[in-house]
Image (spheres, rainbow, N blue to C red):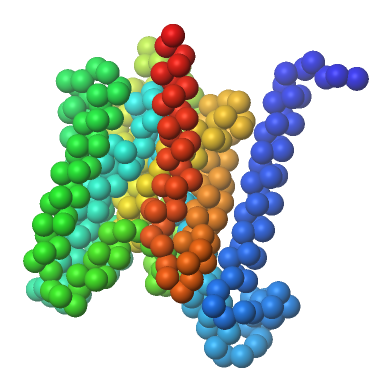
């Protein structure tokens, strides 16, 4: 007998999407840990993960290389997807995202600046310095986008302005890199391309703390975000201080995008494609559902892309942005075509 109750249908859809994403995440965890130039059987992996039993080399491979990389791709990928959702909410447009609007490039510029100055004069850097630099860069880039938004009413032209800001930041970054020491240029270049390679437990712990705190705060803001989606007037009628709320959206989205850039470099299209696919699968934009689902979907997407980056042409490793662009760009093109087609 067919069930015509929309609430039951929606509840089933939400559960199917969540369960599918969780199963995909679990599968990718074992898939990534089991993949690499050194083969480690599933039974060995279980012993190493739960009991740290096995050869010293294999224990180090799992605990010092594969596991930190896997966790960072999951946490930072999820954070980037949530950042994209916040920007899409702020600009009321599904094509807005930290990479397209130049936010990631602003973070990249300031992180590169700090790296060059620190390595040249004090020969010392730490994760906190990079996070602060990335956050400041993201806020400044967002500030320029907001200034453009006040003068440009068409969202398509605002996106073009964001892309121009991104190009300017990238050009300045490349200019700064030319003044870096020869021994540091390779590392700076590799970081600027985006990669989860080489990340350690210290970075994993700090990035996890920042991203999870931000995601929890965003989840607790689900009700005002839902009201804001209905329009500023409706949000004000529901008791939301719109000016203050918009500042919170900017801070949370910038901190999430900046954190990702600080640790692994700029990653393209995750913030645009993942929230769009999630909302399409759930058939809703309710933040209380979309936020956790976007986080899990972003984790799954980045774990999958990182696997491709590592293994597609092993031992040569691709940049993570190359792979995310390969899968994310067609989704964005589809969004643009659909939006353009709906106008006629």
Residue at image location 41% in from the left, 57% down from the top:
320
Taking the image as shown, residue 64 lies to the left or right of residue 247, namely right
Compared across the picture, whether 274 is left or right of 155 comes to right
- Determine the residue positioned at 62% across, 59% down: 28
Name the quadrant containing residue 249: top left
Depth check: 270 or 127 in front?
A: 270
> Is residue 89 visible from the viewing direction of this image?
no
- Residue 189 in view (yes/no): yes
Q: Quadrant of the C terminus?
A: top left
Q: In the image, is residue 56 above or below residue 273?
A: below
Return the x and y of residue 204 as percentages of the image width and height.
Answer: 44, 65
For the point 19% across and 77% down, which residue is it?
Answer: 183
| Residue furthest right as drawn | 1
Q: Position of residue 201 (x, y in %)?
A: 44, 72
- Give the number of marks: 0
Q: Is residue 319 above or below residue 217?
A: below
Q: On the image, which quarter does residue 130 sit in?
A: bottom left
Residue 218 location in percent, x, y?
45, 39
């Amino acid at each position: 007998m067919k069930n015509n109750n929309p609430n039951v249908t929606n509840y089933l859809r939400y559960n199917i999407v969540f369960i599918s994403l969780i199963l995909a995440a679990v599968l990718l965890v074992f898939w990534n840990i089991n993949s690499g130039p050194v083969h480690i059987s599933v039974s060995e992996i279980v012993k190493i993960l739960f009991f740290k039993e096995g050869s010293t080399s294999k224990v180090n491979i799992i605990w010092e290389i594969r596991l930190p990389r896997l966790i960072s791709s999951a946490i930072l990928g999820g954070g980037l997807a949530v950042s994209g959702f916040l920007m899409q909410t702020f600009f009321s447009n599904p094509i807005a995202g930290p990479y397209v609007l130049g936010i990631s490039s602003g973070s990249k510029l300031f992180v590169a600046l700090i790296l060059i100055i620190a390595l040249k004069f004090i020969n010392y850097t730490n994760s906190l310095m990079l996070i602060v630099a990335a956050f400041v860069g993201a806020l400044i880039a967002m500030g320029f986008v907001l200034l453009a938004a006040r003068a440009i009413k068409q969202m398509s032209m605002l996106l073009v302005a964001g892309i121009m800001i991104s190009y300017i930041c990238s050009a300045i970054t490349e200019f700064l890199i030319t003044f870096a020491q020869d021994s540091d240029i390779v590392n700076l270049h590799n970081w600027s391309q985006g990669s989860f390679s080489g990340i350690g437990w210290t970075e994993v712990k700090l990035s996890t703390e920042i991203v999870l705190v931000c995601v929890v705060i965003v989840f607790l803001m689900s009700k005002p975000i839902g009201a804001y989606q209905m329009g500023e007037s409706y949000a004000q009628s529901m008791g939301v201080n719109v000016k203050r709320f918009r500042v919170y959206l900017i801070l949370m989205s910038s901190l999430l995008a900046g954190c990702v850039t600080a640790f692994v470099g700029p990653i393209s299209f995750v913030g645009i494609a993942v929230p769009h696919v999630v909302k399409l699968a759930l058939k809703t934009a309710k933040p209380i559902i979309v936020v956790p689902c976007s986080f899990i979907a972003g984790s799954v997407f980045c774990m999958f892309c990182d696997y491709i980056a590592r293994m597609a042409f092993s031992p040569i490793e691709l940049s993570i942005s190359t792979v995310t662009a390969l899968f994310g760009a067609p989704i964005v093109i589809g969004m643009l075509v659909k939006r353009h087609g709906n106008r006629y």
